[in-house]
Amino acid sequence: MATGHGEYASVQQLRRWEVPKGNVRLDQTLGSGHFGLVVKGFLKSEQATQVVAVKMLKENADKQQKKEFLDELELMKTMVPHPNIVGLIACCTKSG
């Protein structure tokens, strides 16, 4: 977005990433990774329900793993959408 002075604002617009945990319904496990499971899920929004991959932190994660997981989440929030990279749609970090 141009400011009229030859400068550009951030590519990312301010966005509300956090969604209520109740808006996500989990289905089958797709795989596992460093942080925990990846599960097929359904994200309900005002517009529609979409199929998503839900990356979840394992239940017995220690403090360092939680920090690394949240750091990765923050990094993904800054990424510009790309067709060859899985993008972040939303997150649930407020409750468990």
Image (tube, helix red, strand yellow):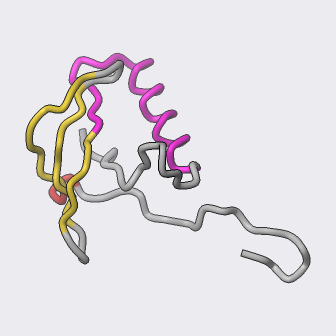
Q: Nearer the viewer, residue 45 or 61?
A: 45
Q: Residue at x 90, y 78 (%)?
A: 5
Q: Residue at x 52, y 55 (%)?
A: 81
Tell me the quadrant of the picture where the C terminus can be found. top left
Q: Nearer the viewer, residue 1 or 91?
A: 1
Q: Quadrant of residue 2?
A: bottom right
User: Residue reaching furthest bottom?
Assistant: 4
Q: Left of 71 or right of it: where is 27? A: left
Q: Residue at x 24, y 58 (%)?
A: 20
In the image, is residue 75 part of the stretch drawn in magenta? yes
Where residue 30 appears, x then y in whole percent? 18, 32
Q: Left of 60 or right of it: where is 8? A: right
Where residue 29 appears, x then y in whole percent? 13, 32
User: Residue reaching furthest left?
Assistant: 27
Q: Residue at x 42, y 30 (%)?
A: 69
Residue range (magenta): 55-78
Q: Left of 9 or right of it: where is 68? A: left
Where 91 sits versus 7, above or below?
Answer: above
In the image, is residue 69 part of the stretch drawn in magenta? yes
